[in-house]
Image: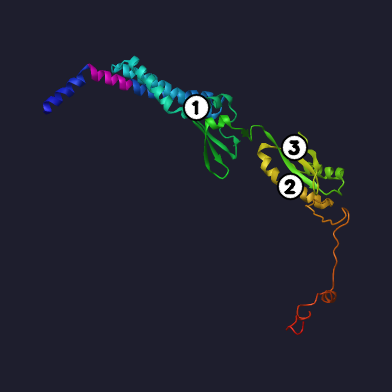
C-alpha cells in the first residue's frame, strides 16, 4: 500500500501536472507582489492630487485587478477553460444581483458619491439629525464618528436620498445671535454697541463685515439678528464668546434685555385690574357672621 502511494507521489512530482501547479503558484505569488507594489505606487502618486479616500480606492482596485488577472492565468496553467468559468461567473453574478438588490443599490450610490464628492474623509457633515466626522467612504456605506464618540454607519443609498450639510467645506463660517432689546431703547445706540463688540473681538473677521438685521417687533422686545464671521477653526470659540460679550456690553451701557411681561385688564381695555389692600382690623370687621351668630332654627312646632 505504501509503495503504491509513493509511486503516485513520484509520478505526480515528475509529471507535467506538478510543473503546471508550480507555474500556477509562481504566477499567483508574483501577481500578489506586483499588485501590492503597483497599488501602493499609484496611491502615492495620486496622494498629492486626490484625497486619502480616492487614493485608497485606487489602491484597492489596482490590487484586485492585477490579482484577478494573474489568478486567471494560473487557472489556465492548471487546464481550466476560462470560457466555462466566465459563463458560470456570469450566472452567479445574476443570481447574486437578484439576491442582493440593496447592496447593489448601495454600490451604485457609492460610485455616485465618489464622482460627486460632496464631502471627503475628515469633513464634518450633518445628515438628518446625525452630525459627525467622516471616517471612511466605502462602496456600501459611509462611516461617521459623532462628537460624543459614537460610530454611525449610513448606507450610501440613504446618503444619496438625504440632504447633506458639509459644515467645514468652506474656510469661514457665520455666527448668528438673536438679540432682543426693550422698546424704550435707542436702536441706533444698540447697533453701535453691537458693532463695538464685534470690533473688539479678535476672532471676528473684518471682511465679510458684521451684520445687524431687524427681525421684528416681538411680544416683549424689538428683535435683531447679530451676525459675525469667523475662520472655520475659530467658529466654536467665537460662538461661545459673543453672547457673553454682548451681555456685558449691554449691562455696561444700560441696555435692557427684556423678559416677557403680562398685564391683566378688566372692563375697559385701558384700565388695569384694580387691586385694594385691606388692613387686618378692616378685614375682621368685614368678615361675615359665622353660623353660630345666625338665628337658630325653630326647635319645635310651638315655636312656629
Circles 2 and 1: CB atoms closer than 8 Å: no
Q: CA distance from mark 3 to mark 1?
A: 44 Å
Quadrant for the C terminus in the image: bottom right
* Sequence-first tag of 2 and 1: 1
The picture quadrant where one finds residue 166 is: top right
Q: Is residue 192 left or right of residue 138?
A: right
Which SS class for mark 2?
helix
Q: Which residue is mark 2?
A: 243
The location of residue 233, given as percent across then percent down, is 66, 38
Q: Is residue 4 left or right of residue 122?
A: left
Which SS class for mark 1?
helix
Query: Looking at the rendered structure, which numbered label has been put on residue 159?
Result: none
Q: Is residue 226 left or right of residue 73?
A: right
Which tag is nearer the camera, tag 3 or tag 2?
Answer: 2
Q: Residue furthest bottom?
A: 302
Image position of 287 with respect to 131: above or below: below
Q: CA distance from mark 2 to mark 1?
A: 46 Å
Which tag is nearer the camera, tag 2 or tag 1?
Answer: 1
Count of numbered marks = 3
Asked whether residue 161 appears in the rendered view, the answer is: yes
Q: CA distance from mark 3 to mark 2?
A: 17 Å
- What predominant SS class does the magenta segment belong to? helix
Q: Counting other residues with Cα less than 10 Å from the Cα at mark 3, is it few (<14), some (14-19), or many (20 or more)?
A: some
The location of residue 103, given as percent across then percent down, is 47, 29
Q: Which residue is mark 3?
A: 205
Residue at 72% x, 46% y is 241
Q: Which residue is mark 1?
A: 105
* Sequence-first tag of 3 and 2: 3
Question: What is the span of residues highlighted in magenta in the rendered image?
Answer: 16-26
* Sequence-first tag of 3 and 1: 1
Residue toward you, 221 or 288: 288
Asked whether residue 33 appears in the rendered view, the answer is: no
Amino acid at each position: 500500500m505504501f509503495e503504491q502511494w509513493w509511486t503516485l507521489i513520484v509520478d505526480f512530482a515528475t509529471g507535467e501536472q506538478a510543473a503546471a501547479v508550480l507555474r500556477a503558484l509562481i504566477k499567483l505569488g508574483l501577481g500578489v507582489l506586483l499588485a501590492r507594489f503597483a497599488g501602493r505606487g499609484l496611491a502615492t502618486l495620486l496622494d498629492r492630487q486626490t484625497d486619502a479616500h480616492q487614493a485608497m480606492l485606487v489602491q484597492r482596485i489596482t490590487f484586485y485587478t492585477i490579482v484577478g488577472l494573474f489568478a486567471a492565468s494560473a487557472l489556465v496553467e492548471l487546464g481550466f477553460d476560462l470560457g466555462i468559468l466566465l459563463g458560470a461567473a456570469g450566472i452567479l453574478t445574476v443570481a447574486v444581483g437578484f439576491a442582493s438588490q440593496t447592496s447593489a443599490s448601495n454600490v451604485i450610490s457609492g460610485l455616485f458619491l465618489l464622482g460627486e464628492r460632496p464631502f471627503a474623509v475628515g469633513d464634518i457633515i450633518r445628515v438628518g439629525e446625525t452630525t459627525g466626522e467622516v471616517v471612511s467612504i466605502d462602496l456600501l456605506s459611509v462611516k461617521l464618528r459623532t462628537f460624543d464618540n459614537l460610530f454611525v454607519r449610513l448606507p450610501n443609498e440613504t446618503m444619496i436620498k438625504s440632504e447633506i450639510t458639509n459644515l467645514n467645506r468652506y474656510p469661514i463660517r457665520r455666527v448668528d445671535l438673536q438679540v432682543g432689546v426693550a422698546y424704550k431703547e435707542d436702536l441706533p445706540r444698540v447697533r453701535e454697541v453691537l458693532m463695538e463688540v464685534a470690533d473688539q473681538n479678535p476672532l471676528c473677521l473684518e471682511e465679510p463685515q458684521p451684520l445687524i438685521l431687524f427681525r421684528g417687533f416681538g411680544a416683549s422686545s424689538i428683535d435683531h439678528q447679530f451676525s459675525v464671521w469667523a475662520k472655520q477653526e475659530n467658529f466654536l470659540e467665537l460662538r461661545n464668546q459673543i453672547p457673553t460679550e454682548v451681555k456685558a456690553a449691554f449691562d455696561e451701557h444700560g441696555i435692557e434685555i427684556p423678559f416677557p411681561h403680562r398685564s391683566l385688564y378688566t372692563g375697559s381695555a385701558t384700565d388695569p385690574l384694580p387691586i385694594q389692600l385691606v388692613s387686618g382690623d378692616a378685614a375682621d370687621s368685614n368678615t361675615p357672621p359665622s353660623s353660630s351668630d345666625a338665628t337658630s332654627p325653630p326647635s319645635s312646632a310651638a315655636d312656629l
